[in-house]
Structures are given as structure tokens and as C-alpha cells.
Image: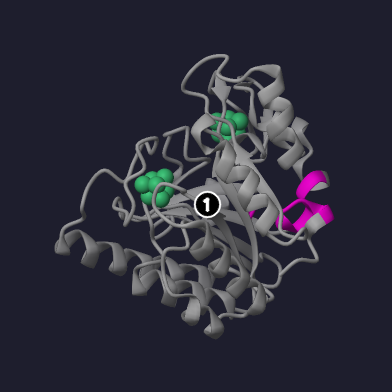
Amino acid sequence: MSLKVIYRGHLTDCNYSCEYCPFAKEKNSREMQVLDKKDLDRFVAWVEHNSSADYPMEIFITPYGEALVRKWYQEAVIHLSHLPHVRKVAAQTNLAWNPQWLSRCNPQTTALWTTYHPDFVSEDKFVDKSNALSAMHIRHSVGVVGLKQHFPHITALRQRLPQDIYMWINAYKREADYYSEAEIAFLENIDQLFRLNLPWYESMGKACKAGDEVVSIEGNGDLFRCHFIKTRKGNIFTDPLASMLKKEACTKATCHCHIGYIHLDDMKSHEVYGSGLLERIPVSYLSNG
Ligand code: SF4
Ligand code: SF4
């Protein structure tokens, strides 16, 4: 078993400005970028010294914005991908960058969760990027936010992508009962797991792997069980890792974000995603890339 570490640094800006995005509304100052790089480098060194044969790690970068346009994140992914006791380094990204740097990564351990934002990039350009990743044997999922105005783009993208690329749809949840049953059926036809993404899961008191098998680490080294419960468990630079890991029931009423609820024990996500859990690739697609 490996420890899954979900990392979120100080970065809070993006080269896109999607109206449905809850973050990435700022432009980071030069000083903030310097701090973000310094802390990321420190985190990477911590992973290098704390992952081991007995304690392998999987790292998932989930920024409040687009990280992979920054050279320091590219270098971090390259470095982590070659560490002997890092089984996976994955990142969420809009793919709006030149993929050439990925040729320096270990394709066995590198994976991407990519999102298509039709308001900001043409279908041609996005498909070319996905094809470039496949040519470099970089495993990746492709997804879209399921806004109704995106439906024609969703259909078109699915037709353009090779069948062995999994396409996920994130349910738009800011409006209650946003979808009709027919719309759910349409989206489910694209993403067979779409229905799993629809609910706000009642998580209070339920067993969750976030806490002992999965942790969230912020740029300053503070460790939390997940991104959604802000009870600090300690700091990776001052506290022994084992002292901060604990199996606990969830203390939040609901969990609705994919990167959270998949860790609920009841979801049995390992059966659905296997080793593709972090980059969101179901077992049936895992030979892609
Ligand atoms: S690409 Fe992602 S991070 Fe950037 S604005 Fe859009 S949703 Fe937010
Ligand atoms: S169910 Fe969600 S909110 Fe609760 S501990 Fe797990 S990831 Fe965190």
C-alpha cells in the first residue's frame, strides 16, 4: 500500500478564467511565485527523504489554478517521477502548455488529469495535445464540466478522442436538480461513471481513507486529512509523518468533490479505478497511454 499525498501549494492563478471556477481569480505576485517554488522544492525533498520501499508514496498536485505552465512544477513532476519510491506523480491541468518537457519524465509513474475548457481552447488544439501525451505514453484522463452549453463540445470531443481514452464529466452542482433524466442519460452515455459524480454524499461519521491512506499537504508543510476538513494534523517539516496519520470517521456533513468522496470506504474506489485512482482512469481503461 502507498500513501497518497495530495499537494496544493501557494499558486492561485491560471492562464484561463473559466466563469464556473471557484478559484484562480488572482494573479500571483513575483514574491508569491518565489515562495511557491521554494516550498514546492522543499516538499519534493521531503518526499525524496520520506518515501521508502516500506512506505512508497503517490503524489497528486491539485492546484488552485494552472500549475504546469510553471517551470518549477514541471521540474518537480520530472524529479518525482524518477524517485525509486514514488509510484505515481499526477496533476490536474488544462493542458495549455507545450508538452515537450514530459519527455524527461518517467512515463511509468507520470499521469495527468486533464480538463477541456471549450471557451478557452479549440477542440483541434486540445485533441492534438491529448494525442501528443499518448504518443509519449503519458497516461491521462480527459474531462469536461457538464454545463449544458458544453453538451455539443462533449459529443464532439468524445468522437475525436480514441476510444481507449477515458472521458469523465463533472456534474455541475451549483444549481439543484440542474439535469433532467434525459440529460443524465446523455452524459452517462459519455461517462459511465457520471451518476457517481452527481450526489452530495452524506459523509458524516463514515469511514474514509483520508487521514491514514490519503493526506492533503499545503505549501507551508501543514498536513490535513483532506482538502475539505481544515483541522491541522501537524507539519511535515517538524512532525514525524506517522504521528499525523490516523484512521477516523468523516466529520463533515457532505462530501461532493470527486477528489474527496472517492476515498470513502463505502465507495470501494480501488475496485473502480485500481492504480488509476488519482488521475481518474477506471480499471477498464488502464492500458491507455
Ligand atoms: S482552467 Fe481550471 S483552474 Fe483555470 S480557471 Fe478554468 S477551472 Fe479554474
Ligand atoms: S469524506 Fe470527504 S470530507 Fe470526509 S474525510 Fe473523506 S475526503 Fe474528507
Q: Residue at x 23, y 63 (%)?
A: 33
Q: Is residue 250 above or below residue 166?
A: above
What is the x, y in percent for residue 167? 67, 49
The answer to which of 163 and 201 lies nearer the viewer is 163
Q: Quadrant of the N terminus?
A: bottom right
Drawn side of residue 252 relative to residue 278, left or right: left
Residue 174 in view, yes or no: yes
Q: How is the image coloured?
A: one colour
The answer to which of 80 and 154 lies nearer the viewer is 154
- The secondary element bearing badge 1 is classed as strand
Drawn side of residue 41 relative to residue 279, left or right: left
277 within the magenta span: yes
Magenta residues?
A: 272-284
267 within the magenta span: no
The answer to which of 279 and 241 lies nearer the viewer is 279
Q: Amino acid at mark 1?
A: Thr
Residue farthest bottom in this picture: 104
Q: Residue at x 65, y 44 (%)?
A: 155
Q: Quadrant of the C terminus?
A: bottom right
Residue 212 in view, yes or no: no
What is the x, y in percent for residue 227? 47, 40
Drawn side of residue 220 relative to residue 5, left or right: left
Asked if disc 1 is less than 8 Å from ligand 1, the answer is yes
Residue farthest top in this picture: 177
Q: Residue at x 42, y 77 (%)?
A: 75
* Ligand 2 image position (quadrant): top right
Residue ID for mark 1: 115
